[in-house]
Image (cartoon, rainbow, N blue to C red):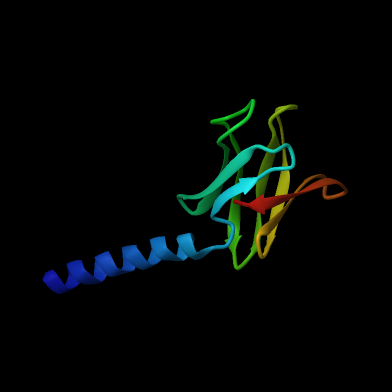
Amino acid sequence: MIRTTIITVAVLFSTGTAFADEPIVGNWKTVAGDTAAITPCADSYCVTLKTGKYAGRQIGKMQGKGGAYTGEITDPAADKTYAGSGTTNGNTLKMQGCVLKVFCKSQTWTKL
């Protein structure tokens, strides 16, 4: 019984650590100068604005690992959601939103 409990706790702890070790997790400065926090949420990473006009609003949800992520991203000013992707490279995060995988817009965010 005790052995099972210890193994369960170890597995849960290692899963949480895997999310924390992902390079997308953290606070990012957007092109507009706002701060966006990317945190683990369920089996994804949630993107939430922490400062600016839309503070507190979740603007994305991504899945992936190792610096490459896909999901959805919302333009808060237009209130439209697009197919999204994010790619980390050191202290930068290239976020891209696309309509029909043809019409895309990109932004590069900097890690705080």
The relative height of residue 8 versus residue 26 in the rendered view (above or below) is below
User: Is residue 9 depicted above or below 42 in this figure?
Assistant: below
> In this rendering, would 4 be left or right of 49?
left
Query: In this rendering, would 68 be left or right of 96?
Result: left
Farthest bottom residue in view: 3
Instruction: Determine whether 88 is above or below 76 in the image.
Output: below
Residue 57 appears at what percent x and percent y? 57, 31
Q: Residue at x 68, y 37 (%)?
A: 74
Vertical relation: 97 (above or below) 76 = below
- The total of numbered circles placed on residues is 0
Residue drawn at (60%, 42%), measured in percent from left and top? Answer: 36
**Image quadrant containing the N terminus:** bottom left
Q: Quadrant of residue 75?
A: top right
Q: Residue at x 65, y 50 (%)?
A: 71
Image coords of residue 18 (percent x, y): 45, 65
x, y percent for residue 32 = 73, 37
Q: Quadrant of residue 99?
A: top right
